[in-house]
Amino acid sequence: MTLTPPLSSGGTGGKGDRTRRHNLSRVLTLLHRGAQLRSQLTSQTGLNRSTIAALVAELTELGLAYESEPDPTRQVGRPSPMVNADARTVGIAINPEIDAITIGVVGLDGTLLKRIRYETESPSTVAEFVKISSVIIESLKGEYEAAGRIVGIGVAVPGLVQVDDGLVRWAPHLGWRDAPVSQLLAAATGYPVWTANDASVGALAEHIYGAGRGITDLIYLNGGASGIGGGIISDGRPVAGRAGYAGEFGHVRVVTNANDGDTREEGSLETEVNRADLLQALGLTNADSETFDDALKGSNDPEVSALVRRQLLSLGTSLRNAVNVLNPEVIVLGGFLSSIFLTDPEFLIERVRAQALEASFESVKILPAQLGADLLMIGASELAFAPLLEDPAAFCTELADSREKNGEPAGSQRL
């Protein structure tokens, strides 16, 4: 499994067919990342106008794109049609946490169409997760299959996920070990499923749509109910490591007075910087991201302020290490890390600047995630969209054949 689709096609056929599939992939990937004037597609791909017109027509016939009138106030000369990814082709995104299972529906244009948060009193077992998720997905099928198509499911798990097959090796806060989440959920729903680390897909989402857009080297740190994870984009591509476990910044020690008797987590970033302590200080037992943000912004309790300052100090030490080792252009903070950062951005920035190597930090920007509560939903959906973007024609053909075999409608075209 890869987090971003290559722009080459694995389709069979002659050279002309392979070239067409390759170009379909290029055009759909551009549209997936934002609507484009047809003239922009021509300039970005280097293809001529007639070829672009044919590719757009094919994507429209497949129900993956449509044309609209451009903004007349921004046009000079003869207007070029605006080409859009069709948001009726959707991916399902799921993020299990210790206090809730969140399920989203994301359009091919990157828009979050629906988000459902199912709160749980304790972390769900794998079996409970599959049952709850499959019931909610079943309730969504009628609405989204009637108007378009669901291409698959992406699951963002707070833990170590094997990159080649999506096996959850260890999600400590959920208590999942060696869990074949993709296989179990696929069997329960009938949809293909891809599973990856939550912060890795978060990094991808911010790289494509958010604070890291246009940035080739960035680090993303996500703070959630299950701890802190990270994702790395280097030279424009995700860094997964040999098995997919790269970016576990939450397990890096930030306190140096450790001794031989300490556990693996003693003094780690996610031990020193955690959401549970903040919730307790704010007098909350459970909260979604919006409620947490509002409570933190509205607090004038000096104990809360002191706790946030201590957590920022530890976060600064971790970011200093990341800057010195990875030399990023941008560090993006998501989840509750974004919330505490925004209480005093200059304090954290100066903390990192003071500790990092001067040359390494001189061009670094530290930014809050732009996608907010939508981030992991959009990131997880990228897992589901990747095969479609890699070879749109082949994917749609296989999906239609599968539905016909199962006695289901083959999927809508653009109406």
Image (tube, rainbow, N blue to C red):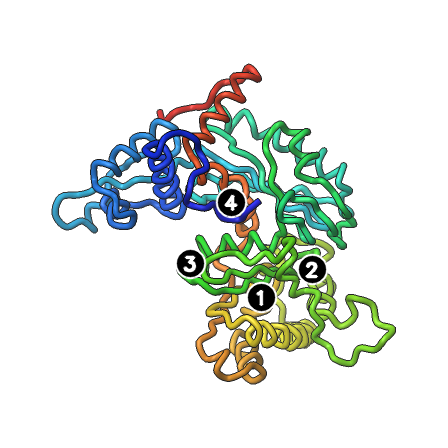
The residue carrying mark 1 is: 297
User: Which label belongs to residue 382?
Assistant: 4
Nearer the observer: mark 2 or 3; the answer is 3
For marks 1 and 4, give the CA distance.
Answer: 32 Å
Which residue in the rendered view is the most extreme toward the left? Answer: 77
Across and down, in percent, residue 243 comes to 65, 53
First of labels 4, 3 by sequence position: 3
Question: Which image quarter is the C terminus in?
Answer: top left
Across and down, in percent, residue 13 comes to 40, 29
Which image quadrant for residue 65?
Answer: top left
Asked whether 285 or 11 is in front, the reply is 11
Across and down, in percent, residue 25 comes to 39, 40
Secondary element type, mark 2: strand
Nearer the observer: mark 1 or 3; the answer is 3
First of labels 1, 4 by sequence position: 1
Which residue in the rendered view is the most extreme toward the top? Answer: 407
- State whether residue 73 is above or below residue 106: below
For marks 4 and 3, give the CA distance.
Answer: 15 Å
The residue carrying mark 2 is: 227
**Residue 294 in sight from this viewpoint:** no
Relative placement, left or right, of 24 versus 198 is left
Nearer the observer: mark 1 or 4; the answer is 4
Q: Name the amino acid, label 1.
A: Lys
- State whether residue 206 is above or below residue 253: above
Asked whether 235 or 211 is in front, the reply is 235
First of labels 4, 2 by sequence position: 2
**Residue 119 in sight from this viewpoint:** yes
Asked whether 235 or 355 is in front, the reply is 235
First of labels 1, 2 by sequence position: 2
The residue carrying mark 3 is: 213
